[in-house]
Image: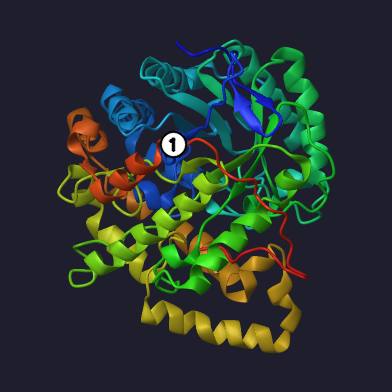
Amino acid sequence: MASGILKVQGDQVVNSNGESVTLRGAALGGWMNMENFITGYPGHESQHRAAMLKVLGKENYEFFFDKFLEYFFTEGDAKYFASLGLNCLRLPFNYHHFEDDMNPRVLKESGFKHLDRVVDLCAQNGIYTILDLHTAPGGQNGDWHSDNPTPHPAFWDHKDHQDRTIWLWEQLAAHYKGNAWVAGYNPINEPCDPQHVRLPAFYNRLEPAIRKIDPDHILWLDGNTFAMEWKGFETVLPNAVYALHDYSMMGFPTGPTYTSTPAQNTSLESSFIRKCLFMTTHNTPIWNGEFGPVYASPTLDPTTHTSINTARLSLLKTQLGIYTRYSTHWSLWLYKDIGLQGMVHTSASSPWNTLLAPLLAKKRTLQLDAWGRRPSPDAEAALKALVEWIDQVAPHAQDTYPTPWKTERHLYRNVFQTFLASSFSEEFAGLFAGKGRQELEELARSFAFEECVQREGLNGVLKENSKVPVGGVKVPVWKREGEEGDELP
């Protein structure tokens, strides 16, 4: 049994006995908040679902996605996760499961069906859960993972988007209050407020609204600019843990190779310490809500995958060592996908991967996914000339928020991964045309734990690092003069 609802005490998270609890685990991305690289579709979840509804019809659409949500995480997944010594699963979800844009503030109780099921499965296996609103009305950032079909985060421009989000958290708080296996609420993932001050103001409105209904659960609050910046934050809220995200470009195909040089290791640690500055200053716990490399494929990288993945796992070990040294709670991204990053992934020979193979190849060639983007000469040549022209005629364009993106990343997002990617939604859905329920269930079953492949090297590293050592050191205050946010993969 859980020893009461977790709470914040100084820079520690403790149970009702006052014993320190360190949360270490991963996120169930791609499940109740679908993402293009995780399950294979192009573009954004709302576009994907609309195209699938058009092809399948309402009844088969509802049947397929219910089966998908069911098979994506079952008792087998929970038992395996717990066997690695991991004790917390972050549960990203899309607000559309609980509210329709054309019927706002009317709760869809059906949204709780699978969320409750997974919370309960985790509890039965000694795993805490953190509820993560990954997609908020209007889009809290301009990226694909907030199901925002534009690069503009309209959440910050319209009070009603924010009010609806507060309303939704009031419903969720009423539903989960008193549940000791829920470690708390992560109100919005990776917010990007260009003005910086509207995020802490939103948290200041959200916190009392939740506390009025549920005074006990921890709030796990992301920093601004993809959880990397703390401009505009001045005070801390009670019973709150502040969250950073700590990806390294050395874990991605377009970044440098990690070779464990002193310079690389110093950079990893100093970047982490910079992101912790707000927590260090205010003596709060530290949660690294997302981090982790992607991995090379034996099929796509037949001669180099072993050396690439050895370097990526070495990078991960170094990062985990930093987090252990500084007593950090962490949640790896990602538990399950179709083979890029997950601890568990679908088989290359599964019905799902087999059906999608031609379109996945097209997506790679056109660089339609931001995550794990692979080199593609034609796409890069098309982009290069435009980047150079824009930087020449509008040199300040590269400073457009989010500033870590620069001109190239803005164009990838606006042109390749928004405009171009959306044009393939119906082609993807067309792969499912004419399929009956038995075939649809077989496709959904591709994600069942028993049908999936375990990434043994990664999971071995996680198991080795799941044990919490006694002690740890305080994160030193670190500030580089004039330092900006880290580049994002």
Colour treatment of the image: rainbow
Looking at the image, residue 6 lies above or below residue 406 = above
Query: Which residue occupies the foreground of this view, 441 or 404?
Result: 404
Residue 219 seen by the camera:
yes
Looking at the image, residue 480 lies above or below residue 380 = above
* Tag count: 1
Residue lying at the far front in this picture: please name it.
Answer: 471
Residue shown at the point (55%, 67%) measured from the top left: 266
Coordinates of residue 248 in the picture (x, y in percent)? 50, 62
Query: Which residue occupies the foreground of this view, 56 or 176?
Result: 176
Q: Quadrant of residue 243?
A: top right
Residue shown at the point (42%, 63%) measured from the top left: 251
Q: Quadrant of residue 187?
A: top right
Where, quadrant-wise, is the N terminus in this rendering? top left
> Horizontally, is 252 left or right of 204 in the view?
left
> Horizontally, is 118 left or right of 409 in the view?
left
The amino acid type, in three-letter code, at marker 1 is Gly
Coordinates of residue 469 in the picture (x, y in percent)? 46, 37
Q: Which residue is mark 1?
A: 25
Residue shown at the point (36%, 60%) measured from the top left: 314
Residue 158 seen by the camera:
no
Coordinates of residue 74 in the picture (x, y in percent)? 30, 25
Coordinates of residue 298 in the picture (x, y in percent)? 19, 62
